Image (spheres, grey):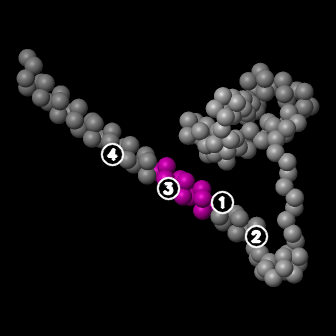
Amino acid sequence: MSDEEQQGEERDGGRGRIGVEIYEQVEQLVKEHGISRTEAFQRLSDETGRRAGTVAANYYRIARQRGGGRARRAPRATAPAAARRGRRPRSGGEAENALAQAQAAIEELAAVVRRQEAELASLREGAEQLRELRKWMSKNVR
């Protein structure tokens, strides 16, 4: 798919539509409220339930497509150069990164489950109150 076709799809509500919406919302927040992009990412995260990192990734993907966005960071020093400066090289970087991502996903899932358990308890309490109210009404309203 060409860039023109992809951009057309994004404008027409096809693939990539959410990214475009996020980009426009971030730009609007930054312009209207004079806040940083990071703060705009967090506000949209709070409003939409998406992770702030997901909001940022969508924003910068669209920004790059439009020729903007943040500059790429310079590559980090290689392990031998780091060792020459007295630091120990990292071992198992990819595995550690994957493990850290998995742990973060598990923690996020656990938080979602805890919120659902609390909501379920609240709903059960409300259902019990409704049963009591119906019982009272059937005795007193005839």
Nearer to me, 21 or 36: 36
Q: Which is more N-terminal, label 2 or label 1?
A: 2
User: Could you say which is closer to the camera, residue 35 or residue 22?
Assistant: 35
Residue at x 81%, y 25% (from the top left corner) = 9
41, 17: nearer the viewer: 41
The first of marks 4 and 3 along the sequence is 3
What kind of residue is marked 2?
Answer: Gly
- Disc 1 from disc 4: Cα separation: 30 Å
C-alpha span from label 4 to label 3: 16 Å
Q: Quadrant of residue 23 in the image? A: top right
User: In the rendering, which numbered label is found on residue 93?
Assistant: 2
| Neighbour tally class for label 3: few under 14, some 14-19, many 20 plus, Cα within 10 Å | few
Q: Amino acid at mark 3?
A: Ala
Identify the secondary structure beneath mark 4. helix
Q: Which portion, as a residue range, is magenta?
A: 102-113
Image location (x, y in percent) of residue 33: 63, 32
Direction from residue 48 to residue 14 in the image, left or right: right
Res 93 quadrant in image: bottom right
Q: Which residue is mark 4?
A: 121
Q: Nearer the viewer, mark 2 or mark 3?
A: 2
In what element is the residue under mark 1?
A: helix
Q: Which residue is mark 1?
A: 101
Q: CA distance from mark 4 to mark 2?
A: 42 Å
- Residue type, label 1: Gln
Q: Which residue is mark 3?
A: 110
The residue located at (27%, 36%) in the rendering is: 127
| Label 3 or label 1, whichever comes before in sequence order | 1
Vertical placement of residue 125 versus 109, above or below: above
